[in-house]
Image (tube, helix red, strand yellow):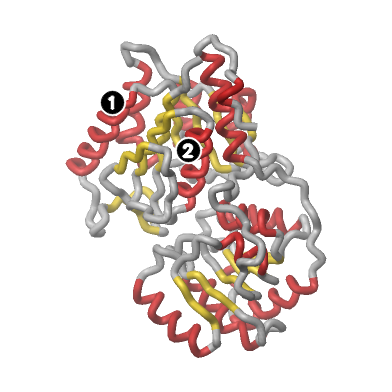
Amino acid sequence: MSAPHIFYYVQYLEGIGHAVRAGRIANALAQHGATVTLVLGGEPVPQLAAPRCDIVQLPPLRATPQSYSRLLQPDGSAADATYQARRRDVLLDAFDVATPDVLMTEGYPFGRWAMEFELGPLLETAAARPSGRPLIIASLRDILQVPKDAQKVTRAVAIYDKHFDAMLIHGDPRLIPIEASFPAIRPFLDTAHYTGLVVPTPSDPVKPGHGEGVDVVVTAGGGAIAERVLAAAIAAKPLSPLADSKWLALAGPRMPEADFSRLTREAAANDVALERFRPDLVSLLAQARLSIQRAGYNTIADLLVSGCRAVLVPDGDQQQREQPLRAERLAALGRAVSLDESNLTPKTMAAAIAEAMDQDISPINLDLDGAATSARIVLELSARRQGSEFAPEYRCC
């Protein structure tokens, strides 16, 4: 079997978590023999490390927390039909050049519905390719968002049934089975492969002794929805049992400059160090006494690798169920304290910190080898499609 060529489409509309997870999977694929074309549809992510992959940057699109269906250009103007057509053409040209053996779509068709203007043509092009249809795989987060419009659910199921061969679920069903968030996926679970959670890989390992004496680390992902959490945590420091400890807050690369400037002043007044980004976050958490954070996929992955105590403040957007569900489950397992954003004040944050510090962390047995396992599954499925055995030199675990 020759090493397969993987064409991996990733669209992120607000934060950068999807790009980070996909980058880890793409790196694992490349490290174990595959040629990977990683297609990025959001704004460029300088922090993304995918040195062995060919990166295709589409004309960027973003959205706002209020509407994922309203697509914007980087300057904030609407992405009109002309802009979308240019993106679609860049995507289809890249696919034609790559002639991949495997097409992977991150989130789609059980999310990213706003991207149908280009993903529909991509799937149809793949199906009609003269050299033969590639293996088509959906790369899915462990918790999916169910749309309010039931017709979108019906359409998602129909698209999967028509075009897709398999799905990778980047989670562990012992924590959250995917059907708990998206019941309509049940008829296709015979094509599902759980990979475990995609956590920091050997290229970004935990480094004992590199914690710099930081006791409390405050983070909120990429920063797009970080301001409330950081502001409450900073103000809670003097009220908390860790008032005399060393605190570090990370605002995230996507936090608006006005919010960052205001938090800089508040952090200085409360003796909290504030930075934008740290590449050694997991090492910091491994040495810290407490993490205060959102409950997004990647921040939870970092938390589970580090073993740190945690206060979780899931995204309080009523339209989003992902973070509250993840936080509820981890709190129920005794792994964290969950604080509802609607009840977020410096006093409630201080109380949650006290509760977390009194908590005996319960060990939970979860699969945290998601990147390597994803690579192994993709390579095995590709080999099977080619009628070959999975060659040992491509085995990743």
Question: Which badge, 1 or 2, is on the more N-terminal residue?
Answer: 2
Q: Which residue is located at x 59 percent, y 74 percent?
A: 344
User: Is label 1 in a helix, a strand or a loop?
Assistant: helix
* Quadrant in which residue 92 is drawn: top left
User: Is label 2 in a helix, a strand or a loop?
Assistant: helix
Circle 2: residue type: Ala
Res. 184 in view: no
41 lies left or right of 290: left
Residue that carries the numbered disc 1 in the rendered image:
97
* Quadrant in which residue 35 is drawn: top left
Q: In the displayed structure, would residue 63 be above or below residue 11?
A: below
Q: Which residue is located at x 24 percent, y 35 percent?
A: 90
166 lies left or right of 79: right
Q: Which residue is located at x 25 percent, y 53 percent?
A: 73
Q: In the displayed structure, would residue 357 be above or below residue 306?
A: below
Residue that carries the numbered disc 2 in the rendered image:
26
Circle 1: residue type: Val
Q: Position of residue 282 (x, y in %)?
A: 60, 60
Pointer 1: residues within 10 angstroms few (<14), some, or many (20+)? few
